Amino acid sequence: MAREPYGNVAEFARWFLSQPIRSLRPPADASFTLVTTGGRVEGITLFRRGQFQVELFNNPPDPHGSGFPEHRHPNVDSIEFFLAGEIDFTIRGKALPRDVVYGVAEDGAARLCGTVRRVRPTDYHGATVGTKGGVFMSIQQWLNGVPPSSVVLDWIGPPHVEVRRSSDWHDAPAEARCDGGDVLQALQSAARLLGEIAAGTVAASDVGPTIELQVLPAIQRATRALATT
């Protein structure tokens, strides 16, 4: 098998951005909806190969604005590529210039289109999104042997309100949206968080709410769903 022409996230980003649109190979369950404490987000996986992946995120327009709370992805090294809208993005408390976030170029595109930011596994980051919404790509390398899924699942921060993946979940009762994979994923998330606590790389007070409000309820929902099948 031929060796891939990239070995890290920067090389992968350069390769992916140079490819024709026909090179996109989304997995069958590529689309999902996420509701965070900052609002609703639509996502789609555009490309996945080995430990490398690209996701497209859309924060729909909202008269009250929306955003992402401060968080990090412990197993993902990524380059965020901004496309459109008003995304006031921060990394470690540092923001993009306001004239870039809210400006419009002569051709009508957002001034932030094409702006890139590197986000490492230790980088806490978040965003306030203006009333026009915002669209960006997340170009990712997954680390530590963790198979790519979505950065919304590899998450340390305020727990999500809801995650829905695949359109056939939309009409299903909440208990039916889980299976054995959800149990395994929840256990893996808990194990990673406990490992970080043991290693001293994260404080127990930072991840305790995530385990209590996100991981444990996922295990309980999945266990009840399995009991009824």
Image: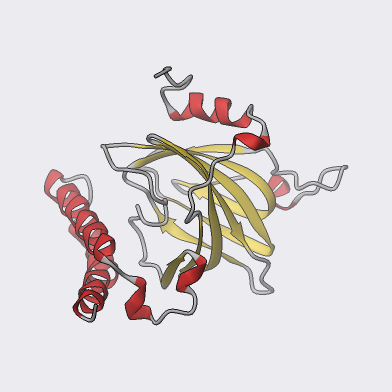
The image quadrant that residue 194 belongs to is bottom left
Residue 107 can be seen in this image = yes
Q: Nearer the viewer, residue 161 or 19?
A: 19
The image quadrant that residue 226 belongs to is bottom left
Q: Nearer the viewer, residue 127 or 195?
A: 195
The image quadrant that residue 172 belongs to is bottom left
Residue 32 image position (x, y, % from top left): 50, 62
Q: Nearer the viewer, residue 224 or 191?
A: 224
- The C terminus appears in which quarter of the rendering? bottom left
Residue 38 can be seen in this image = no
Q: Nearer the viewer, residue 153 or 24?
A: 24
Q: Is residue 70 above or below residue 212?
A: above
Residue 71 image position (x, y, % from top left): 39, 55
Question: Residue at horizontal 58%, vertical 39%?
Answer: 24
Question: Residue at horizontal 16%, vertical 51%?
Answer: 197
Horizontal side of residue 26 vs 194, given as left or right: right
Q: Is residue 115 above or below residue 164?
A: above
- The N terminus appears in which quarter of the rendering? top left
Residue 155 image position (x, y, % from top left): 35, 55
